[in-house]
Image (cartoon, rainbow, N blue to C red):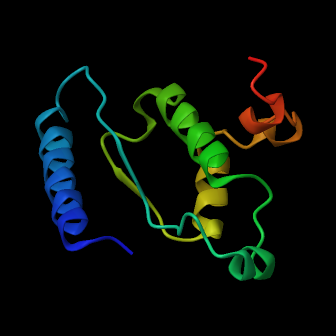
Amino acid sequence: KRSAFGEINSHHIWGLSAALRDELSCSEVNCRELRVGLPVNRPMAERENEPRDRPLSEDIGDLCAGVAASGGVMDGELITINSQVELEDNLVKFNADKDKGINLPHLWEFNGSL
């Protein structure tokens, strides 16, 4: 859960993003916003009850890449992700679900040998 200041900062950023999306709607510049309401740093018990196939950061990264590659598909729409189902649906919508089988090593698997 966010602190009071964190909540205020989030609302400021949401307002700025909405203003940018509106201001740039008739521009050649694409401005998109992705709001993720899924919990991070979940307790181990919650991870065991509701496991994710991949780390949330990987799915969000893939979704951002898919959104960026989609061109004008969105037209400044706001994407909200508040459940794993919404995340999966958007990965499919923006053609970002195809690399789930690549199984690249995670950063922590390199043991500092980068």
Q: In this view, does 5 lie to the left or right of 52?
A: left
In x, y percent, where is residue 2? 33, 70
**Location of residue 97 (image quadrant):** top right
Closest to the observer, 52 or 100: 52
The quarter in which the C terminus is drawn is: top right
When the figure is inspected, residue 5 is found, relative to residue 98, above or below; the finding is below
Residue at image point 20% right, 51% down: 13
When the figure is inspected, residue 32 is found, relative to residue 89, above or below; the finding is above
Q: In this view, does 51 lie to the left or right of 66?
A: right
All told, the count of numbered labels is 0
When the figure is inspected, residue 50 is found, relative to residue 25, above or below; the finding is below
Residue at image point 31% right, 28% down: 30
Residue at image point 39% right, 75% down: 1
Closest to the observer, 67 or 9: 9
**Location of residue 47 (image quadrant):** bottom right
In x, y percent, where is residue 89? 63, 58
In x, y percent, where is residue 66? 57, 34
